[in-house]
Image (tube, rainbow, N blue to C red):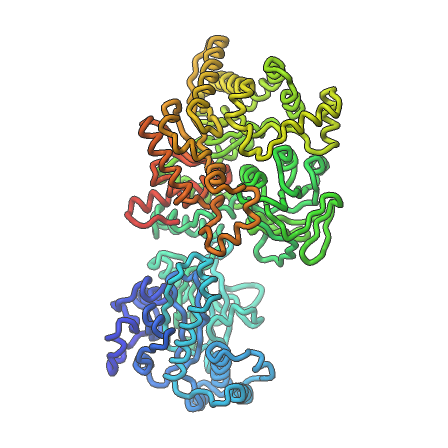
Amino acid sequence: MLHPNLKDAAVQNDPHTTLVTETAPIANDTHGGRAKCLQRLVRLHLPVPHTVALSFDAVARIGKGNLPDVQAVVGQFPAGTLLCVRPSSQDPDWGGPGAVLNIGINDTRFEALCKTIGEKPAAALYTRFVQAYAVGVARLDPDMFDDVKGDGRLALQASLSAYEAETEEEFPQDPATQLAAVLRSMARAWDGTSARLLRQAKGAPADAGLGLVVQQMVFGVGTGQCGAGVLQLVDSDTGLPQITGRYLSQSQGRDALEGDAAALYLTCDPRGPSFEELVPEAFAELTAHASLMRQRLRAEMQVEFVIEDGKLHILDGVRVSRSSRASVRIAVALADDGIISREEALMRVQPRTLTELLHRQVDPRVKRDRIGRGIPASPGAATGKIVFNATEAQASAARGEPCILVRRETSPEDIRGMHAAQAVITERGGITSHAAVIGRGMGLPCVVGASNMHLNMAKRTITAPDGRVFTTGDEITVDGTKGEILAGAAAMQEAALDDTFTRLMEWAQDCADIGIRANADTPADAQTARNFNAHGIGLCRTEHMFFDPGRLTVMREMIFAATGEDRRAVLERLLPMQRDDFTQLFRIMQGQPVCIRLFDPPLHEFLPADKAGQRELAEALGLPLSQVTRRIESMTEYNPMLGLRGVRLGVTVPEIYEMQARAIFEATIEASRDGEPVVPEIMIPLVSARREVEMVKASVDAIAAAVRSERDATFTYRLGVMVETPRAALRAAEIAPHCAFLSFGTNDLTQMTYGLSRDDAGRFMSDYVQQGVFPEDPFHVLDQDGVGELLQLGAERGRKAQPGITLSICGEHGGNPESIAFCRDAGFDYVSCSPFRVPVARLAAAQLAISHKIGGEDFI
């Protein structure tokens, strides 16, 4: 226990080198999490050894060469005490330099210990420190100790001799000198480039501070029952209650976790001897302490302990490391037990970790045989045989063989292949490329921009960076969460959508104050959205409905029609298909809004690019191949994403929008017969001018009037605009009076604002981010300064012109916590994202509302 040394008040009077007592001025943001946790353990009157905490400021000064009064620090401990130094960062996930044990041992102390604990244990302590000091402090090569054999006095002497031979000086004997060198080394290690990059990758700010704790050593070696171990009350992988850990006799620190065959189980176990059987009194005391820590520290803790001659000592308590699955279970269990509130349980789960619960994942414990790497575009993992086109994927699925679709890049005509495949890999593309967006919407694992693998479509091979060649039928695994492609079939962990997850989502629903809708194009997408309790569909991309083989030929026939009347005649055959699509969506989402975007892509995307496909089309249409080829060539555009698409098609080829509007209204009547009245939302894409909206609105209103008259039915609908061009955002004041809603399509808006192709930016975006040109990939994280300013301008001007207008975003940014925070602050009504990102968005929205309620910073 703590016993302040009254002879020396230097530490007590220095706020930067503080003796850890119940009332000492120690805080997480000045001394770090470990120091604060140790103070809490002291307040619980647990058997914690003497400890002195060094503040962030003290360690920063040490790194610059300004040491505190080290002799005064040593003087806080009983004479002859050995010490250890451990890092204490503000967040334990940020890491820190490794602990150094047995500081203060020297020749004199070694001889004294030989008489009390025995020569062999004493020599082990001294040898361990000499080697740790040489490698960690003196920065010597650890290979210098390869020739040190055995243990005891001979091993110690060999280690000392190796040190002296390498440094040409004797091993330091003064405890204060040893401690000063250790403190200086750990402070400088924290400021090293590699350490800084590692912790920044884990979310630490660039100027994150490090504290250090100097603690009295308790020997886990010696006479009687001695040893060290760790214990926790839950399983780190599952989060279920289970006492886990290890204990190793005659050991120190965390040696028990290093795979020593002599390590004991903690509880009685048929596989071998246990700590519970060996020292039952200490085991009972330890589990009681762990339960108290859980209750009073309000967290699942891993307890590091030492047994010295049968007596228990608590060295440390750290938050249990946990998988994403375990983090949800632990948070909910703590709330169920009344230890934390439901709101705090929500705040303790990082939104992005939910992604791993929603999909199968590669088992993190297995060895990975990586053959390629790209951008992790859609999370989850799947194994299957390689196929190189949609037809092969469909054939593979028909045989019941899982397959992986590999393409240079995908286009809308690959949709059917994506539906048949277990995962998708593309050589090109970025986070908002076609494959990425569709993959996320379908919950399909996807890796894009895998350019380090060479794809030969003619030979139908993939060549890995190490030269291995894979071809059609070879089995591979796609890890869309990490952006990796693995050889063979990797072991998997199944999705974890259990009752605990459901309850956490229910709590989030009660707290969130911004709506969360889903982007859903098919009945399956809509059902997923409904299962995740989305507040409706915020974007239904109707063009994806036309790539079904039974519809694609009809669509192509419409494209080749010479007159408006001919086009209407062909579209009459598509009308019942579209009506059935919408009826299914409305019935699944009964009572929830469904926002349907009218046809958007350029028509050439529905036409075959290869000669074989063109020949098949000519046969299907009964036209000469030359005529088909000329027609396709005439529709080619230099920049089709800025060409004849979206509302421009609605104005120049109005028959498509007329058919879609009729299908929507007839489906509305049909779905409303056996359920709640449906109020569809119709969205006009790629608007730039008010007149475009006026023309489409007049046409849609006329169709609505005709359907009401023909069916003798009443219904209402809402018509709005998808704001995807900078001009639409800037001219929102003149567009808004004609709309019920403005939905900002941030994918295209980002593309047009930056002048970047979202399909090609992946080739250089990582370089731009690494060199600080962009802080983040703007297609992945909303650019709040540039694109965000357009959103704010559009929202302000639109709402001023039309006070009751509904505002939202429906791009892929809608699932990002940062984007949700921005939209919430800007007064948007909802965000819409891929169905499988709905839970992430709901949790993020709940955390934002809770943070606002308690006046804290947003938890992002």
- What residue is shown at x 47% (from left), y 87% (from top)? 118
Whole-percent x, y for residue 381 in the image: 59, 47
Whole-percent x, y for residue 222 in the image: 46, 82
Give the quarter of the image for residue 154.
bottom right
Q: Is residue 672 left or right of residue 36?
A: right
- Tell me if residue 483 comes above or below residue 632 in the rendering: below
- What residue is shown at x 57% (from left), y 33% (from top)? 640
> Along the line of sight, which residue is nearer the eye, 679 or 295?
679
> Along the line of sight, which residue is nearer the eye, 50 or 267?
50
Res. 523 visible in picture: no
- What residue is shown at x 59% (from left), y 40% (from top)? 435
Q: Is residue 554 left or right of residue 590?
A: right
Q: Is residue 659 left or right of residue 817?
A: right
- Tell me if residue 155 comes above or below residue 799 in the rendering: below
- Tell me if residue 720 comes above or below residue 418 in the rendering: above
> Along the line of sight, which residue is nearer the eye, 708 or 105?
708
Whole-percent x, y for residue 256 in the image: 51, 70
- What residue is shown at x 65% (from left), y 47% (from top)? 383
Whole-percent x, y for residue 848 in the image: 35, 44
Res. 313 visible in picture: yes
